[in-house]
Amino acid sequence: MAITAIRGFNDILPGDSDVWRRIEKEAVEVFVGFGFSEIKIPVVERTELFLRSIGQGTDIVEKEMYTFCDRRGESLSLRPEGTASVVRAYIEHRLYERTPVCRLFYSGPMFRYERPQKGRYRQFYQIGAEVLGEKSPKLDAEILQMVLMVLERLGLKDTTLYINSLGCTLCRPPFRNRLIAFLEKKREGLCEDCNRRMGVNPLRVLDCKNSACIEAITDAPSILDSLCDTCREHFSEVRRRLELTGIDYTVNPRMVRGLDYYTRTAFEITSEGLGAQNAIVAGGRYDNLVKELGGPDTPCFGFAMGVERIALVVKDRYRGSVPLTVFIPMGDDAEREGIQIVGILRDRGIRVVVDYRDGSLKGRMRRADRLGARFVIILGEDELRSGVVTLRDMESGLQERVSLDLAVDRIQLELKER
Ligand code: HAM
């Protein structure tokens, strides 16, 4: 029997991979423009890193990690996200000694044992960015502006930005107690998961998607009414800056996020047409994490975008975006001369495939068409003698004999128009 991929682990096939590359290219270009540099982090870390950062009582740590023991018996986990590793690397390599504010981005696969459905997979790709060492609310707004710039470049419309404040170590514990007192009274109306969560992670009850739970907690206390003065001022300033930049947003006091490290600003961006798994970007502030993991007191803000989900929305726009030219040499001399010609085409950024098979020109043209050729360059004995090539535009059907330089110009013009 043929071996298939594991459930929730996908192959990204040609065509789709063009879309992915485009998403990454646009994101990286924007990030670099905002002063970010890339960090490459390992796929596997010590399990303890995730327990201490994402949090013991979270779904990710409780139920979704791919954890195993290596040959020496050490507990390791496939990374379920990138923030923990970036913070670990920041502390381990003392990046704070190099620069007062560190702006890092990363991309790659993450792993969570979730129930697969459209937009939710067990291996999925994130492009993320983290700023370490800046506490100003102006930064929160600037990074949100950067994220929206990436989405705009990708032509993503119909998105909604939700923001919330999750308070700090000063104001969240009293809110948590108020919430527990409220939830105790609603116990019967809450789902089994929420009843369990109440003890370990009561804030998560606020964003349970179960309709009975939503109903039971309609008049739950709002975290925004419990913020201390510093957190309230921080949140107001984020909102002021967003308004100043002309960014639309919706405040959602129920949005609490599934990772424990957040403080103050948290956000999510959703996109229409994705169904239940509609968050395409999410992140926020995590001012205590570096210190909790043994580093200096370092306020941070970051986010991660879900590549699969963005690709689902933009895929029709970017599929197969680089036009292909098929080179058909007719005969041994043309084949030999062709090596140089193909070299020149590729040097000039043209994507070329050589057709090596013999046969009639008609048959070879048909094959070029099936290869998806936008242009075909034919080099026969006649062309060789006259120092030209035959260029065929497969879209218009126009065919002409031109110099190699002119053929290059025509193809490059088409590339530029893309
Ligand atoms: P997150 O909300 O867990 O945050 O994930 C961020 C994004 O990754 C989600 O909005 C979604 O687009 C995508 N994503 C998450 N799980 C899946 C899945 N199973 N299948 C497909 N896509 C998925 C984080 O991971 C934080 N590290 C973000 C962050 C960075 N916060 C601060 N800095």
Image (cartoon, grey):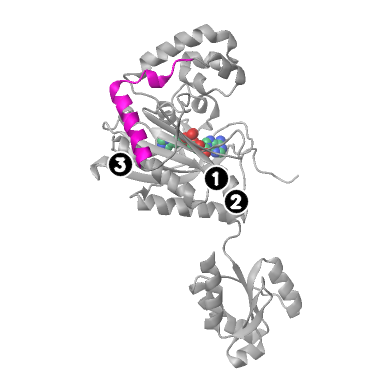
Q: Residue 47 location, x and y as percent?
A: 45, 30
Report the residue at 35% width, 29% height from top: 235
Magenta stretch: includes residue 152 = no
Disc 1 to disc 3: CB gap under 8 Å: no
Examine the rendering and report whether any part of residue 53 can be seen.
yes
Q: Are marks 2 and 1 in contact (CB under 8 Å)?
A: no
Q: Is mark 1 within 8 Å of ligand 1?
A: yes
Q: Quadrant of residue 123?
A: top right
Q: Which residue is mark 1?
A: 310
Label 1 residue SS: helix
Label located before the other in sequence (3 or 2): 3
Q: Which residue is mark 2?
A: 315
Query: Is the N terminus in the top left, top right, bottom left or bottom right quadrant?
Result: top right
Q: Nearer the viewer, mark 3 or mark 2?
A: 2
Q: Position of residue 54 (x, y in %)?
A: 43, 28
Q: Is residue 231 magenta?
A: yes
Which label sits in the foreground, 1 or 3? 1
Q: Give the mark nearer the N terminus: 1 vs 3.
A: 3
Q: Residue at x 54, y 16 (%)?
A: 194
Say what amino acid the circle numbered 3 marks: His
Above-or-below relation of 31 to 381: above
Q: CA distance from mark 3 to mark 2?
A: 38 Å
Q: Specify whether 238 is left or right of 359.
A: left
Residue that label 3 marks? 93
Up/down of 401 relative to 110, above or below? below
